[in-house]
Amino acid sequence: MIPFLFLSILLLGGSFTNRRTQSYLVIVFGFILFILAGFRSISVGTDTESYKQYFDIIESGYFLPVEVGWVYLNKLIIFLGGDFQSLLIVTSAITIFPIVYILRKYSYAPMFSLFLYYNLYIYFYSFNISRQTLAVTLIFVAIVFLLKNKSLLYLLFVGIATLFHTAALVALPLFFVNRIPDKTFIYVLGICLTALIGLLLPIQLAAYLSTFGYANYFENYEFGNVVGNALMLVLLNGFFFFVLMNIKVKDINFKIYFVFILISNLLVRVPFNGRIVMFFSIFLLLFFPYFIQNSKIKEKPLLYFIITLYALVMFFRSFGAGEILPYENVLFNI
């Protein structure tokens, strides 16, 4: 764990350089993250060995009942003479480098955004559920087009994302996010209702999510503890109200963040809820630096501290999940 923690500290340190320096550092550290993910051993991640089995089935010419995008990506690697490690390398590249590009071009603080990508555990999910994190990256690209008011491109990339993981369809309602009335009453009501539904009706929500291929998780795992999850919602929603009161303009950026909170509330007790929430939490990479720059609070270091603390709590809370430890790298034989 120590090397991963050291990398986290380096990412944070790079966040306090000037914007121009960060635009170069984010490429360097993005490449490091790519090496760690793409050249990981097959033993790293609970689903990696399953992906190897998928690869072997596809290579043998048999039908595989998974999303067509993943099947044809495997077929492309096989056609080009690559092996399963080649698939991991290519998947990691098209998962990580578009994110690096977006952060470099659109984030107010690219290295701080990369720090969030790492510490909110989104990056580490790519060691495990590669298909889904690839779809999450495509949704991130789609959201950028949505921010630029390019609706058709948003829909196109959501569609492409679903070719790799059907769950990407949960992001489709963001198409209508700008229709949310900019009224404090609406924000408060939405938070209260979704928090109550999430705490009291998790079974009904799980039944709905089963249509996206998560039924086995809900059958084999228990729902979260009410008290513990309620405390999590207090922290999550408390920070939302802090943002609500201090952000200068409640534009589309804020409304997407609002939807992220709503989804987090609804799924707080659902097993493996992070796999769905991730389609929305990826936007935090852009939103938190945006909020820091567009906050009524003049003490920007205080905001950096609060958000950094939140990210580190998530890092320590989640680290090791998905059996990414012990970590092995085939490139460096470690």
Image (spheres, rainbow, N blue to C red):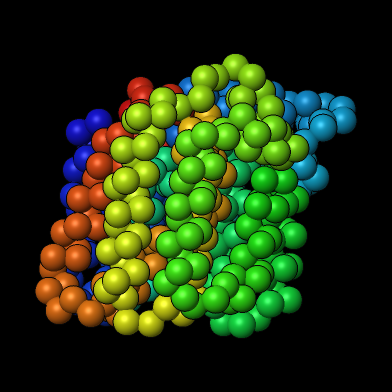
Which quadrant would the N terminus be assigned to in this image? top left
User: Residue at position x 51%, y 40% from top?
Assistant: 198
User: Residue at position x 74%, y 60% from top?
Assistant: 159
Residue 311 drawn above or below residue 158: above
Residue 270 drawn above or below residue 25: above
User: Residue at position x 73%, y 58% from top?
Assistant: 160
Residue 124: x and y in percent read 42, 40
Quick check: 16 left or right of 324? Answer: left
Which quadrant would the C terminus be assigned to in this image? top left
**Residue 198 shows up from this direction:** yes
Residue 307 drawn above or below residue 272: below
Quick check: 137 left or right of 152? Answer: left
Quick check: 188 left or right of 56? Answer: left
Quick check: 175 left or right of 330? Answer: right
Q: Residue furthest top?
A: 220
**Residue 86 shows up from this direction:** no
Which corner quadrant of the image does residue 221 belong to? top right
Identify which residue, 127 or 35, lies in the foreground.
Answer: 127
Which corner quadrant of the image does residue 70 belong to? top right
User: Residue at position x 63%, y 37% from top?
Assistant: 205
Number of residue marks: 0
Identify which residue, 263 or 143, lies in the foreground.
Answer: 263
Residue 112: x and y in percent read 28, 63
Identify which residue, 132 or 54, lies in the foreground.
Answer: 132
Residue 238: x and y in percent read 30, 54
Residue 310: x and y in percent read 26, 50
Residue 310 drawn above or below residue 221: below
